[in-house]
Image (cartoon, rainbow, N blue to C red):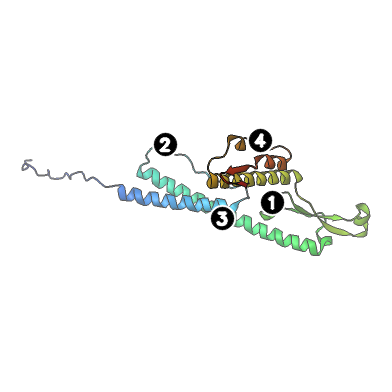
Amino acid sequence: MTTRPGSTPLGFLPEVETDECAARRTLLDQIAKMERELSSLFCASFPRTGFEWGVASRGGPRLLNLSELEQLRDDLARRLEDTRRALSDRTFLEEQNRVLIERMMLEPANYKWVRVQNADIGLPGCKSWHVRPRLGIIGMLAGWWHVKISSGCPLATQHLVAANLRLAASSALGLAHQAFGPLPCDVYDAGPAPADASAWFSRTSCRVATEGHGKTF
């Protein structure tokens, strides 16, 4: 078979180079959108636990090809759908538990020994509602039932107060730095927070002297 110079032989087509930029851009936009939605679900689910947020790794840092990007997009879509369904089921159960608490408060005798905790209604902390008899065995025999509401976790509350004091001290130092420039080094050297958080807060407070006047933080 003879061909003219510069022509393509019969039965053979020239290789066509495809531009993957548009396809990659579309896939990356879809992946970014799903990651944002997954992040929003993560924030909405707090402080609930038990959800799976991870997606399988693609073998370390490298440039993914089109098929791998499609697989990543599909994995994110499945993870997003599963998490939405699980969160919907959890919130439905939490609403049922809120209704249960209201009924327990109204008619405790109908819900003997039933206990509902904060985690059962999607809230942090150790607070609980527990239907118990008044005066122990006497109340049990007499049918005197009531809802005992716990006071939560004292230890966790103490840690929360200490954390809030640290945040307040840090904010005060930040405002002082913005208004008067760098502060002396000993201002920042307050050390770790002791058991008495108020003492730590007082150590972090400082008096910043400026020319002609002074400010206290």
Location of residue 135 in the rendering, given as x and y in whole percent from the top left corner: 91, 54
| Amino acid type at image mark 4 | Pro
- Looking at marks 2 and 4 on the same chain, the residue that comes earlier in the sequence is marked by 2
Q: Which residue is mark 3?
A: 85
**Which one is nearer the viewer's eye here, 5 or 155?**
155
**Which one is nearer the viewer's eye here, 135 or 72?**
135
Label 3: state its secondary structure.
helix
- Looking at marks 1 and 3 on the same chain, the residue that comes earlier in the sequence is marked by 3
- Looking at marks 2 and 1 on the same chain, the residue that comes earlier in the sequence is marked by 2
Frontmost of labels 1 and 4 is 4
- Looking at marks 3 and 2 on the same chain, the residue that comes earlier in the sequence is marked by 2
Residue 141 lies left or right of residue 58; in this view the side is right
Q: Which residue is mark 4?
A: 192
Q: Name the quadrant containing residue 2.
A: top left
| Amino acid type at image mark 1 | Ala
Outermost residue, bottom side: 106
Frontmost of labels 1 and 3 is 1
Spatial separation of the CA atoms under disc 1 and disc 4: 31 Å
| Quadrant assignment for the N terminus | top left
Spatial separation of the CA atoms under disc 1 and disc 3: 19 Å
Location of residue 166 in the rendering, given as x and y in whole percent from the top left corner: 64, 43
